[in-house]
Image: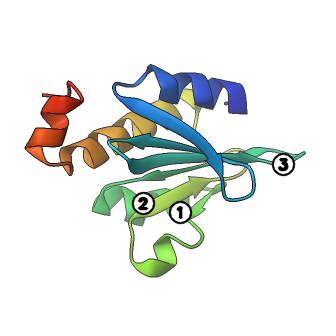
């Protein structure tokens, strides 16, 4: 997945907003809460997203996937796809979609209604 593919996919999810911060990272939010972060250097893009407890145990065992720097060290269940082979594009989309759903579900019912998520 390229950085452009990542941004286009995140934009296609309901009620998302985008900001570039933290030294050029593409930060995607739903209801003001982060659900995915994309950053890339000259070699390969890195994508960071929230996962379930089980996925947090399993995914970092794959080459090219690790607990997300900064976030995981603070007890948050986030992983980062940072190198090949990592996850396929379809798998990345599925995990990013799930991250969006988890973060959206954590919003108040009022906020979910305001955003058209209910």
Residue 2 place in picture, x, y as percent: 71, 30
Q: Earlier in the sequence, mark 3 or mark 2?
A: 3
Mark 2 and mark 3 in contact (Cβ < 8 Å)?
no
Distance, label 1 to label 2, CA atoms, is 6 Å
Residue 96 place in picture, x, y as percent: 44, 39
* Residue depicted at x 60% and y 29%: 7
* Residue depicted at x 60% and y 70%: 69
Task: Name the mark nearer the viewer: 3 or 1.
Answer: 3
Residue 29 place in picture, x, y as percent: 43, 43
Distance, label 3 to label 1, CA atoms, is 23 Å
Task: Name the mark nearer the viewer: 3 or 2.
Answer: 3
Q: Which quarter of the rendered picture does the C terminus lie within?
A: top left
* Residue depicted at x 58% and y 63%: 66
Judge left or right: residue 105 versus residue 52.
Answer: left
Judge left or right: residue 55 versus residue 101.
Answer: right
Q: Helix, strand or loop at disc 1? A: helix
Image position of 61 with respect to 101: above or below: below
Q: Which residue is mark 1?
A: 61
Can residue 66 be seen in this snapshot?
yes
What number is the disc on residue 15? none
Q: Which residue is mark 3?
A: 41
Image position of 51 with respect to 105: above or below: below
Residue 84 place in picture, x, y as percent: 72, 45
What number is the disc on residue 58? 2
Mark 2 and mark 1 in contact (Cβ < 8 Å)?
yes
Distance, label 3 to label 2, CA atoms, is 26 Å
Place residue 58 in its image quadrant: bottom left
Place residue 113 in its image quadrant: top left
Q: Helix, strand or loop at disc 3? A: loop
């Amino acid at each position: 997945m390229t950085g452009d593919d990542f941004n286009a996919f995140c934009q296609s999810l309901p009620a998302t907003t985008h900001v570039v911060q933290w030294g050029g990272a593409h930060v995607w939010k739903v209801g003001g809460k982060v659900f995915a972060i994309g950053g890339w250097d000259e070699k390969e893009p890195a994508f960071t997203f929230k996962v379930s407890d089980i996925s947090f145990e399993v995914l970092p065992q794959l080459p090219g996937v690790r607990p997300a720097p900064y976030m995981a060290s603070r007890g948050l269940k986030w992983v980062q796809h940072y190198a090949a082979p990592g996850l396929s594009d379809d798998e990345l989309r599925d995990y990013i979609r799930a991250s969006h759903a988890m973060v959206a579900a954590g919003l108040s019912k009022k906020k979910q209604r305001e955003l058209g998520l209910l």
